């Protein structure tokens, strides 16, 4: 199993830096972005499995970023990170397809746990899709030449 | 306590105001009307009584005058129609007396006297013939005036009587005819006048000697001690009231007789004369007192009822006002604390990450053996652990704040309050037992079940119980009373203790976050604010009433239906609206 590729989005630079170090040490390949625009850029350039996304950010808001991610990369799992215990934004996030939400401050072990769960879910989903494709190729071999979906 | 006395003061003031305005004003008006009526009635009656007495005096005065002048006239007639010889002739005088007595029984006897006062002829019950009267008062007077009516005197017969005498001049000589008036007859004539119970009439001569007897005491020929009262030069009828020497106030009417100059006195005791007036006034006073008592009693109850309603209304208004203010204040504080919690959580997150990194570095150094094992390193590690602990502590505080201010997920279930409360009590019972506190549970029968969040409610009541136990620490006879009853569409659960109570100035702060009276480190001051937040979210209300050293009561009212509707209308700032500078 290759390492999880994680994108951490938060407007606290120091938090990004430190958390990246911690996660790297724990075998998670971590990318960081300080805002929504950067995050979307990173997603374009790299293949990412899980995104941890701060809800409250200047510029592009967390919920907006989530919407865009889910539009473009529906298979990427997103965990919302919030300083609020606000059910509203959490529920909104979940409705838009976020995997879960966690409260700040969060211990690194808890973060890792959530990331792994999300990654497992993504893997299961990908497996399912792969399996479906294989099934289709077996039944319709010509489908190999059809345009592959993301 | 202060509030209660203020309320009772207000109650008394209001009642007094209503009593005085509703009752006193009409009462004074009625009293004025009554007083005026009695005054005029009394004046009228007094005048009436005095007039009546005067009329009696006047009437009888004329009557007696007529009687005496009638007798005098008869005697004059007899004298004129006889000469000395014919009147003294044997048998003529009894004949004349008989004729006179046929007209009136007033005459007792009849006598003829010569000019020297010798009694030459007599007819009557006494043996007076032959006696000489030349020195008697009446004979001297009649010789001088020709007609004379005497005062009452004893005379030869030694019995009180008075006489009427007329003189006749015949040629060169004079003779005199004298008649004695029947004292009994005359007395009855005057004494027979009666007015009311005590009204009486009597005659006095100019010297104030009784000429008739007086019913209330006063024999013939005795001097009247009251004579001074009615001495008057005025002619005609006079009426007045005066104190008699024997005591007792009387109403008098006097009239002087023309014939004799005697004074007819008609008098009546004041109390008797004014008896109808006094009776009428007494009846009126009785009615006023009885009616007044009824009116006052009714007014008192009415005023009490009204004042009570007003006081309750004022109290409710005040309570509602303070509750509104408190709710507004708490909402504001909620907004603020949510913001603070969020802003604190971000740096906390950074600190947490840094702390974890430090620990990671330690672990790595330990693993590759570059970590020296000395006191400083141990102290550093301990210090980092302490930072971790303090971050967790901050986290608890911010989470508490957020619980007070923000919605968290509610899981609605059906709750049977009695069994639910018994479970909660079961959780604190051990702690209460240690402090020697009794927990009494009283639940109304047939309480409806509730749709609410049991986990959050449990937190609320555990908090309330813990506070109650704290309030009862170190006190004897500690008791916590849990009651539940239905109030309209609400279910009210009250937790009441008889502990130290909350001072009035603290009462409106108890639900504010971070308000605590516990020593530093013992409480965050978030317990009751969390309760408030939860109960509000569940669409209910939490209220407190307390008295220092008597205890506190926290009442949680929960809606029996529609518990979610309130939560949805509660204003919140969501993540989009906020900023993070």
Image (tube, coloured by chain):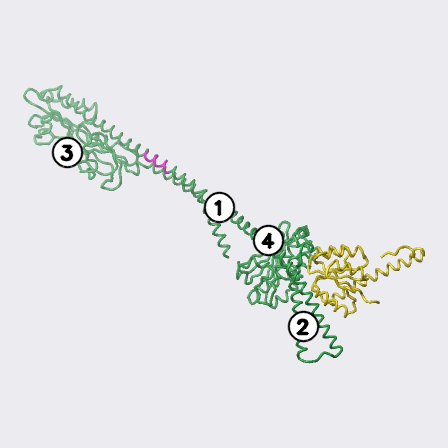
Chain colours: A yellow, B green
Q: Nearer the viewer, residue B474 or B234?
A: B474
Q: Position of residue B487 (x, y in %)?
A: 62, 51
First to last magenta residue range: B35-43
- Secondary structure character of the magenta stretch overall: helix
Q: Are marks 2 and 3 on the same chain?
A: yes
Determine crowd level at label 4: few under 14, some 14-19, many 20+ residues with C-alpha closer than 10 A: few
Q: Is residue B505 visible?
A: yes
- Cα separation, mark 2 vs mark 3, equals 145 Å
Q: Quadrant of residue B261?
A: top left
Q: Nearer the viewer, residue B438 or B281?
A: B438
Q: Is residue B385 magenta?
A: no
- Cα separation, mark 1 vs mark 4, equals 40 Å
Q: Are marks 2 and 1 on the same chain?
A: yes
| Chain bearing mark 3 | B
In the image, which disc is placed on residue B153?
3
* Secondary structure under the numbered disc 3 in the rendered image: loop
* Secondary structure under the numbered disc 1 in the rendered image: helix
Q: Please report whichever mark, 1 or 4, sits nearer to the chain's N-terminal start.
A: 1
CB under 8 Å between discs 4 and 3: no
* Secondary structure under the numbered disc 4 in the rendered image: helix
User: In the rendered image, which residue does mark 4 sit on?
Assistant: B328
Determine crowd level at label 3: few under 14, some 14-19, many 20+ residues with C-alpha closer than 10 A: some
């Amino acid at each position: 199993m290759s390492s999880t590729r994680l994108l951490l989005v938060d407007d606290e630079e120091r938090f990004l830096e430190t958390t990246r170090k911690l996660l790297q040490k724990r075998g998670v390949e971590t990318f960081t972005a300080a805002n929504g625009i950067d995050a979307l850029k990173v997603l374009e350039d790299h293949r990412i499995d899980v995104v941890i996304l701060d809800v409250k950010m200047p510029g592009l808001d967390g919920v907006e970023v989530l919407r865009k991610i889910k539009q473009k990369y529906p298979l990427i799992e997103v965990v919302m990170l919030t300083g609020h215990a606000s059910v509203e934004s959490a529920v909104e996030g979940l409705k838009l397809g976020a995997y879960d939400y966690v409260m700040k401050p969060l211990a690194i072990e808890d973060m890792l746990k959530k990331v792994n769960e999300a990654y497992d879910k993504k893997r299961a989903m990908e497996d399912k899709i792969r399996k479906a494709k294989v099934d289709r190729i077996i039944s319709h071999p010509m489908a190999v030449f059809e345009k592959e979906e993301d | 306590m202060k509030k209660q006395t203020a309320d009772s003061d207000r109650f008394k003031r209001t009642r007094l105001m209503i009593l005085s305005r509703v009752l006193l004003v009409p009462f004074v008006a009625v009293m004025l009307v009554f007083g005026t009526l009695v005054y005029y009635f009394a004046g009228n009656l007094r005048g009436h009584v005095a007039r009546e007495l005067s009329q009696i005096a006047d009437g009888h005065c004329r009557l007696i005058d007529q009687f005496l002048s009638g007798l005098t006239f008869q005697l004059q007639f007899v004298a004129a129609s006889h000469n000395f010889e014919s009147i003294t002739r044997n048998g003529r005088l009894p004949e004349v007396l008989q004729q006179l007595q046929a007209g009136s029984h007033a005459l007792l006897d009849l006598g003829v006297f010569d000019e020297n006062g010798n009694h030459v002829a007599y007819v009557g019950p006494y043996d007076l013939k032959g006696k000489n009267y030349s020195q008697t008062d009446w004979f001297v007077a009649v010789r001088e005036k020709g007609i004379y009516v005497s005062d009452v005197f004893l005379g030869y017969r030694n019995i009180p009587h008075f006489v009427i005498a007329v003189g006749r001049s015949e040629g060169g000589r004079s003779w005199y005819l004298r008649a004695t008036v029947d004292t009994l007859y005359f007395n009855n004539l005057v004494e027979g006048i009666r007015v009311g119970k005590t009204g009486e009439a009597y005659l006095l001569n100019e010297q104030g000697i009784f000429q008739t007897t007086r019913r209330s005491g006063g024999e013939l020929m005795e001097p009247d001690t009251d004579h001074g009262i009615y001495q008057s030069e005025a002619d005609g009828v006079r009426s007045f009231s005066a104190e008699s020497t024997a005591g007792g106030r009387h109403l008098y009417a006097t009239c002087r007789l023309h014939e004799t100059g005697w004074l007819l006195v008609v008098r009546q005791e004041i109390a008797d004369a004014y008896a109808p007036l006094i009776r009428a006034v007494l009846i009126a006073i009785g009615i006023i007192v009885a009616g007044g008592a009824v009116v006052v009693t009714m007014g008192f109850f009415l005023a009490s009822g009204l004042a009570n309603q007003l006081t309750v209304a004022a109290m409710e208004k005040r309570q509602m006002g303070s509750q509104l203010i408190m709710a507004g204040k708490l909402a504001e504080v909620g907004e603020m604390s949510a913001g603070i919690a969020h802003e604190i959580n971000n740096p906390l997150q950074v600190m947490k990450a840094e702390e974890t990194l430090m620990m990671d570095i330690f672990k790595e150094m330990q693993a590759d053996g570059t970590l020296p094992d000395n006191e400083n390193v141990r102290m550093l590690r301990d210090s980092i652990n302490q930072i971790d602990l303090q971050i967790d502590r901050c986290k608890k505080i911010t989470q508490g704040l957020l619980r007070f201010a923000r919605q968290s997920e509610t899981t609605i279930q059906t709750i049977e309050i009695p069994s639910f409360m018994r479970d909660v009590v079961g959780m604190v019972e051990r702690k209460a037992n240690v402090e020697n506190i009794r927990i009494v549970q009283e639940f109304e029968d047939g309480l409806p079940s509730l749709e609410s969040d049991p986990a959050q409610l449990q937190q609320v009541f555990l908090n309330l119980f813990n506070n109650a136990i704290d309030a009862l620490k170190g006190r004897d006879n500690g008791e916590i009373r849990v009651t539940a009853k239905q109030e309209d569409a609400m279910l009210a659960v009250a937790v009441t203790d008889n502990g130290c109570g909350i001072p009035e100035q603290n009462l409106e702060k108890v639900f504010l976050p971070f308000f605590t009276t516990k020593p530093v480190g013992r409480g965050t001051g978030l317990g009751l604010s969390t309760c408030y937040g939860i109960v509000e979210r569940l669409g209910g209300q939490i209220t407190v009433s307390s008295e220092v050293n008597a205890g506190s009561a926290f009442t949680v009212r929960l809606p029996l239906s529609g518990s979610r509707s309130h939560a949805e209308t509660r204003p919140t700032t969501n993540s989009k609206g906020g900023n993070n500078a």
